[in-house]
Image (cartoon, helix red, strand yellow):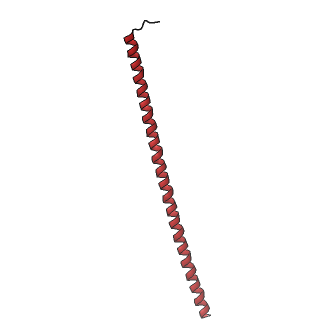
Amino acid sequence: MQNLSFKHLVVEFFRYYYYLTIDVMVTKLMLTGIGLFLMASARSSIRLKTKLKSQSSQRRTITHIWKMINFILIQDKTNIIQMKG
């Protein structure tokens, strides 16, 4: 076993401590980055779902209006045919 001086032990401790501190900081930054990415993707997913729901709702409304117009036109045609016949 080596004969380690106090100075050498202190230097080794701080070297280890700062490596550990840097590792912890990098890990925190990575986790923060991953968290921010997940939040951003969740927000865009929610926006996309909302947009798709809105478009779907608009399509349903337009389809419903179109069906009503066709129904009214068909009723008018049958009324005209009945009046002629």
Report the side of 51 relative to 14 (left or right).
Answer: right
Q: Residue at x 44, y 38 (%)?
A: 32
Q: Residue at x 43, y 6 (%)?
A: 3
The quarter of the displayed image where residue 20 is located: top left
Point out residue 68 in the picture as x, y percentages from the top left corner.
55, 77
If the image is split into quadrants, where does the C terminus sit? bottom right
Please tell me which residue lies in front, 35 or 79. Answer: 35
Point out residue 2 in the picture as x, y percentages from the top left corner.
44, 6
Q: Residue at x 41, y 18 (%)?
A: 13
Vertical order, 57 against 12 (above or below): below
Vertical order, 61 against 2 (above or below): below
Q: Residue at x 52, y 65 (%)?
A: 57
Point out residue 24 in the picture as x, y percentages from the top left corner.
44, 29
Point out residue 14 in the picture as x, y percentages from the top left corner.
39, 19
Please tell me which residue lies in front, 53 or 79. Answer: 53
Tally the numbered discs.
0
